[in-house]
Image (cartoon, grey):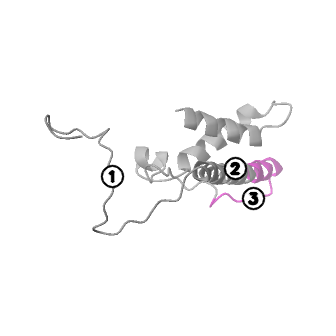
Amino acid sequence: MEHANRSIAQVLQTLVHNDQKNWEDMCLAIKFALNSNISATTGYALFELNYRYIPQLGQHLSTDTQFTGVKQFSQQALWNLTIAHNTIVEHHVMQTHHANHKRMASEHYLPGDLVYLSTKNLALPKGRAK
């Protein structure tokens, strides 16, 4: 939950103007972008888990219209989705970089190599050597 809240906060910080008067306008686009995002943990987007498909908003959204208000709305919707998507991807890349930064390179073992195994988290039968 903390990770989800952090992601929402990062996207809001990127999209909301400095005067913070447009945050409410961004909520639906951000919600759509986050629910369309495929989780590295599950391999599924929330839309896919809940509704069995991912809605394809924006692919058929046309800015080719004679009505100025409709044209502005569709251009802004496409722009918001693009920014939200790029922000999500950018933050996933940064999080992966920071997570891997402190990791040590793993050693490569071959079949038959002897290694020590920690039994700290193993449920062994009573009477067995740890």
* Numbered badge on residue 87: 2
Q: Residue at x 66, y 51 (%)?
A: 94
Say whether residue 19 is magenta. no
Relative to 121, is 95 above or below? below
Mark 2, Cα crowd under 10 Å, few <14 / some 14-19 / many 20+, is many
Q: Nearer the viewer, residue 112 or 71?
A: 112
Q: Residue at x 58, y 48 (%)?
A: 99
Mark in front: 3 vs 2: 2
Q: Nearer the viewer, residue 98 or 55?
A: 98
Q: Residue 7 vs residue 43: left or right?
A: right
Look at mark 3 in the image and give the residue it sits on.
63
Q: Amino acid at mark 2?
A: Thr
The earlier-in-sequence mark between 3 and 2 is 3
The earlier-in-sequence mark between 1 and 2 is 2
Q: Residue at x 60, y 33 (%)?
A: 5
CA distance for labels 1 and 2: 43 Å
Q: Amino acid at mark 1?
A: Tyr
Describe the element under mark 2 as helix, strand or loop: helix
Return the x and y of residue 1 as percentages of the image width and height: 52, 32
